[in-house]
Image (cartoon, rainbow, N blue to C red):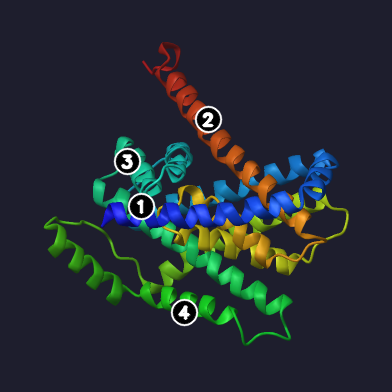
Amino acid sequence: MNRAGRWIGVAIGLVGAGFVARELASSWDEVTASVGGADPLLLVTALLVGVISMTSIGMAWGRCISVVGARLPRRAVLRSYFVGQLGKYVPGGIWPVVGRAEMARREGVGGSAAYGSTVLSMSLTYLAAALVSTSAWLLFARDDRNQTWWPIAGLVLAGVTALHPAIVTRVLSLLRRVSRRHLDLVVPSWGTSVGLLMRHVPAWLGISTATWLVARALDSTPPDLSNLVFATSLSWLLGFLAFGVPGGIGVREAIFIATVQLTSSGVAVAVALVARVLFVVVDVAGAGVSSLAVGIARRWSDHPGRARP
């Protein structure tokens, strides 16, 4: 079953990559012209906004850790988050969860809290993406509200309902019976879970803003912000739901190109590809800088001159 799911994920990724490759080939001149004339200042600004956005998700995960009954220092939270996030580029779909949770366990968080908080955080992250996507659709598609936003709205409603403690408790009970393990987790109240959900919303506004800045850097015509927020959050959401596709590669870009409204398809392809590279840089830089910060802090605290008499 796992092998079949992996191959299905690979197939979905290949289809998405094929679509992007076809669009890239048909619009090659537009793509190269857009990238060649990009505004470097806007790209650097987009990178900084991307770093802030992804950091905010890491900090929200830290709050999830405390809600389920554990503690982890802020620097350790960010290192565990960014290093663990690199697992999303490994085929299989489960590695972002395993990566984050195992990093947290190395920092002393119990296994139940590490995995429980990671699953909670990732669920809230993409539920927030669905919420932002639906809201943005209602803003830019005022005359077409009775079509494709309904499934996303249904996902939001189902997700918010699933946060209720009665449902979470039953799911945990089922997992305990299936795994035959004692899962020692604090079940947050519905209000707390909804509050955690709202903590993830600014990240998607930031990710969308970073993508909007990329679009401005590549094209002098200002894109419709609400449409770009919709296309960005929806493409990331569906890329995540394409289980087994490493980082949603191909799927995210294909959805973005199909839903965004820019000057031309060539510009849309260029924005999708440059945004992908930008967020890969954010992930790698975040892992490197956070690991360096933790290492420096620990060496400083262990320095003989810092020891108290």
Query: Which residue in the structure is indicated by mark 3?
Result: 102
Disc 1 residue type? Arg
In-image side of 51 versus 87 (left or right) = right
Q: Do callouts 3 and 1 mark residues in contact (Cβ within 8 Å)?
A: no
Measured from the top left, where is residue 75 in percent x and y? Answer: 47, 37
Q: CA distance from mark 4 to mark 2?
A: 37 Å
Residue 111 place in picture, x, y as percent: 25, 47
Q: Earlier in the sequence, mark 2 or mark 1?
A: 1
Q: Which residue matches tag 2? A: 288
- Tag shown at residue 157: 4
Relative to 115, say whether 168 is above or below: below
Query: What is the CA distance from the residue labelled 3 to the residue labelled 4?
Result: 31 Å
> Distance of mark 4 from mark 1, alpha carbons?
29 Å
Residue under the image location 46 percent in, 40 percent down: 86
Q: Which of 306/279 is in front?
A: 279
> Can residue 262 be spotted in the picture?
yes
First in sequence, mark 3 or 1: give its number.
1
